[in-house]
Amino acid sequence: MPKPSSMDPERLLMVKAKTLQRLVKEASYYKKETEENTAKLEQMKADGKDEYDIKKFAEVLEESVMMIPDSENRKNIAVEDLRQFVEGNDLIQDSEWMI
């Protein structure tokens, strides 16, 4: 596979845009999952479910919460990478990936 710098600029733009799109989806997924699991955990507590089940589900929720900053950070890095690529590349101005 060719090095990224030798790739077609339009193709590289597409790859960077799709990467950003995936990371935006991922970040929103973790936020949504955290909200849903928080509600589910509260319901489990209200229903008097087994303490072991509640503890394990709280651990699952904690893992989701920990992923939010990581996914936001990766998304922000991808935004900056794409911004720098677009600013530094005049060949892609007529690309279908440019809005």
Image (tube, rainbow, N blue to C red):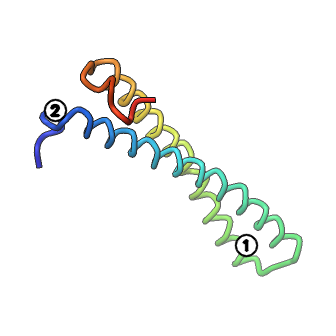
1 vs 2, front mark? 2
In this rendering, position of residue 77 left or right of residue 33: left
Residue 62 is situated, as x and y percent measured from the top left of the image, at 62, 57
Q: Residue at x 74, y 59 (%)?
A: 38
Residue 57's place in the image compared with 64, above or below, is below
Residue 45 is situated, as x and y percent measured from the top left of the image, at 83, 70
Residue 95's place in the image compared with 41, above or below, is above
Name which residue type carries label 2. Answer: Ser
Mark 1 surroundings within 10 Å by alpha-carbon count, few (fewer than 14), some (14 through 19), many (20 or more): some
Q: Residue furthest right?
A: 46
Do residues under tags 1 and 2 come within 8 Å of each other at their CB atoms? no
Name which residue type carries label 1. Answer: Ile
Residue 68 is situated, as x and y percent measured from the top left of the image, at 57, 47
In this rendering, position of residue 28 left or right of residue 17: right
Residue 77's place in the image compared with 55, above or below, is above
From the viewer's side, name the closer residue of 44 and 8.
8
Q: Considering only order in the chain, which callout, 2 or 1, is on the residue closer to the N terminus?
A: 2
Q: Residue at x 13, y 40 (%)?
A: 3
Residue 17 is situated, as x and y percent measured from the top left of the image, at 39, 39
Q: What is the secondary structure assignment of the residue under circle 2?
A: helix
Q: Residue at x 47, y 39 (%)?
A: 75
Q: How many labels sit on residues?
A: 2
Instruction: Quickly name the residue at label 2.
Output: 5
In this rendering, position of residue 68 left or right of residue 87: right
Q: Residue at x 80, y 73 (%)?
A: 44
From the viewer's side, name the closer residue of 46 and 98.
98
Instruction: Quickly name the residue at label 1.
Output: 54
Q: What is the secondary structure assignment of the residue under circle 1?
A: helix
The residues bearing labels 1 and 2 have C-alpha atoms spaced at a distance of: 50 Å
Mark linked to residue 18 = none
Hey, which quadrant is residue 84 in on the image? top left
Hey, which quadrant is residue 90 in on the image? top left
